[in-house]
Amino acid sequence: MIDGLIMIVLILIKLGVIFAVIMTMAAYLVLAERKILARMQLRHGPNRVGPFGMMQPLADVIKLLTKEDFLPDRADKWLFLLAPGMAAVTAILTFAVVPFGPPLQVFGHELPLVVIDLNVGVLYFLGLSSLAVYGVALGGWASNSKYSLLGGIRGLAQLISYELSMGLALVPVVMLARSFSLTDIVLAQQAAPFILVNPLAFLIFLVSVVAESKRTPFDMPEAENELVGGFHTEYSGMRFGLFFVGEYINLVILSSMVTVFFLGGWLGPLLPGVIWFGVKVLALCFFFIWVRGSLPRLRYDQLMHFGWKILLPLALLNVLLTGAVLLWSRT
Amino acid sequence: MSLWRDIKGTLQPFWVTLCNMMRRPVTVQYPEQKQQMAQRYRGRLMLTRDPEGHERCVACHLCSAACPVDCISMQAAEGDDGRRHAAWFRINFTRCIFCGLCTEACPTLAIQVTGEFELAGRDPLKLVWEKDDLLVDHGGHTPDYNFYRQSGVGVAAPRGGLPTETAPVDPKDLMP
Ligand code: SF4
Ligand code: SF4
């Protein structure tokens, strides 16, 4: 009885901490992105609110919360109100399967540092990232504006195209780890992280992930200078904020996924696992920001061309090769 | 090789941005650091005085005619010595676009630009500047220029009273 109670409390604490950490990370990623991009462009970035602008996320939240929540006249009301939630919730839900550390011993209980270790974690991740498309597509559709609609359609087409290569890039990982569970995948990288074992899959996955996060050079769905704001043109206040936060949570999640699948998750010498995990995720987040600062946006046809004619065949070839090597090494 | 070119073109920007990250930002932190404006910066306008300390403006309306947004207005008046001046002179700085065309139109170099640009405020009416606000006690960019030295002052009233002059014509005396 007492045991069960302690377990429930521990799990609740874990959930609370994870939620808080993700939210804080997303908020401060916005600040970090603005700061780093600014430095890359020889500016300072936000530095007025609090020391070094550290309170800027708070100011942004207050601003977003106090702004008018605008509903366009002929928008599809319920879908319009629902879409931002879809974007944010699917992003948060994905973190449920991410193992961010080795199991912890608390009061004689084994507390795994993952919300739930699904044995089909990879599929769960792929499924939720497909669901996330609905936020974009429905938001674009329900706003009843041409810019939003174009943004939504682009988002739909882009995410579907790149999801294919993303899924296919994960097949070699599953083949190597012989499991769909993310914890097992991390444990399978004891000898060497999969980035060394299969660098091609890593590259394909990385590119697909950047496309999945809808960021430059793949930010077609919200291309500011063609579509005003793309799928979130008509949104204001906290609903826009949800889209925005969802994007950055997504960034954290996708970085964690790259870490888990290819960089060996929490594994690493000397430092505790959680710290290794955090360092890897933050490094990847910096990489995403760096990409945004360096590369211009692709044209839509280039994007499709790259996805379907280069990434997809490469991913298929990679699956074939990995399978062949695995078979050959076993016999 | 276009593939090689593409790969190089993709990787090069990363190096450039990384280098830029290590450099110092060029931003001027405005309220704390003030920028030194250029000599000929076109900021707020002023009305200057000639070397003798008199108002230069002769209320010729050329500046208000030249102004593309019509923000200068004035009323001409004449002193006892025949010298023209503006009875009142008003510039609406909420409309002024700081183009400097008025200064180019001015024959007496009375209206000139200053380097001052911090005009922002909460009350728009405070930005309507009267002659007293605009007048300064120096010659601006051209301290030595003296229009009346060259042109002389017009004849003082009553006109046509000198022995060499004929009396002014009264156009109404032809009326039936
Ligand atoms: S600077 Fe230009 S806009 Fe301003 S008062 Fe002179 S002519 Fe008008
Ligand atoms: S153009 Fe010069 S002299 Fe003429 S009214 Fe304007 S300021 Fe006065």
Image (cartoon, grey):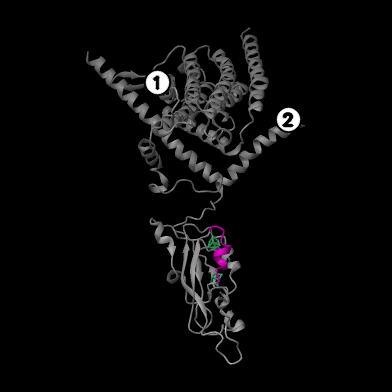
Q: Please indicate whether residue A19 sits to the left or right of residue B23 in the image.
A: left
* Picture coordinates of residue A123, whole percent (x, y): 49, 14
In this view, A20 is above or below B91 = above
Does the image show residue A264? no
- Taking depth in this image into account, of B41 and B149 the one nearest to the observer is B149
Label 1 and label 2: CA atoms lie apart by 43 Å
Give me the residue at 62% from left, 82% from top.
Answer: B150
Q: Which residues are magenta?
A: B60-69
* Picture coordinates of residue B120, whole percent (x, y): 43, 57
Q: Residues within 10 Å of mark 2 (few under 14, many from 20)?
A: few
- Taking depth in this image into account, of B128 and A40 the one nearest to the observer is B128
Give me the residue at 56% from left, 37% from top.
Answer: A290
Among the 4 quarters of the image, the one containing residue B60: bottom right
| Callout 2 amino acid | Leu
Q: Which residue is mark 2?
A: B3
Residue at the left extreme? A2
Name the mark on residue A25. none
Task: Please say whether residue B62 is one of the residues in the magenta stretch.
Answer: yes
Does the image show residue A191? yes
| Callout 1 amino acid | Val
